[in-house]
Image (cartoon, helix red, strand yellow):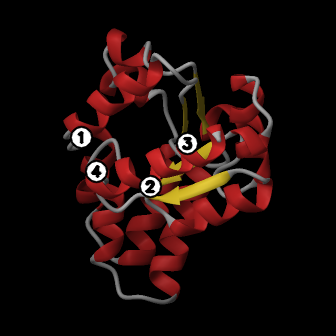
Amino acid sequence: MLTVDAWVEFCGTLPEGEIVDTARRLNHQYDSGKISLKDFLDEVSRVTGRVRSDIVAIFTHPAATKNARLFEYIQELSSKYKIGLLSNVGTNWVREDFLNTEEQKLFSAMVFSYEIGTTKPDPKAYEAIANKLGAKPSEAVFIDDQLAYCEGAEDFGMKAIVYSNFPQIKTELEQTLSAANN
């Protein structure tokens, strides 16, 4: 939701079923640091029949178009709330290449799957970000564009909102925060 996700787009071109499930499983293994980038790329290429260089391009030259409206809103919220970033990612790309110094300051805490050895929706991922924020799960609102990750957050005790688009998320988050403050 902070960017256009090239991996999700790639998976959308695969036939539903075992091939896409295997590719996603391999991605989670890579994001959690359980397999190397080389092994991940080799296996995804083998399983999907796609050219390895096309898969490499997704991870070495990500098309990171920032969601400017969302960043402006995060900036507004960061003056009132602790904002955390929890991402399934296999490298430090978010810190090194995607977020500039000012954007990084918007987040009170950032947790990346490769650093903690697991990915969303594992409860350990939600626990890691809550701990880093110094928040109880019941005090947190988790937002993600993946329903399964939101369900995992709710199972952990967080409120969760599935991101569809900016107007929707702004409305739902403001309603959630208003209800929590009353």
Give the residue type at disc 3. Leu
- Callout 2: SS: helix
Which mark is in front, 3 or 1?
3
Residue 172 badge: 2
- Location of mark 1 (residue): 67
Viewer-side label of 1, 2: 2
Q: Position of residue 14 (x, y in %)?
A: 33, 80
- Looking at the rendered structure, the secondary structure element under dot 4 is helix
Residue 52 coordinates in the image, percent (x, y): 30, 59
Q: Are marks 2 and 3 in contact (CB under 8 Å)?
A: no
Q: On the rendered image, what quadrant is the C terminus found in?
A: top right
What separation in Å lies between label 3 and label 1 (alpha carbons)? 22 Å
According to the image, label 3 marks what residue?
Answer: 177
Residue drawn where x is 71% and y is 50% of the image: 158
Residue bearing mark 4? 166
First reached walking from the N terminus: tag 3 or tag 1: 1
| Structural distance between the alpha carbons of marks 4 and 2 | 10 Å
Q: Name the amino acid, label 2.
A: Glu
User: Residue 114 falls in which quadrant of the image?
Assistant: top right
Image: 102 above or below 29: above
Label 4 amino acid?
A: Phe
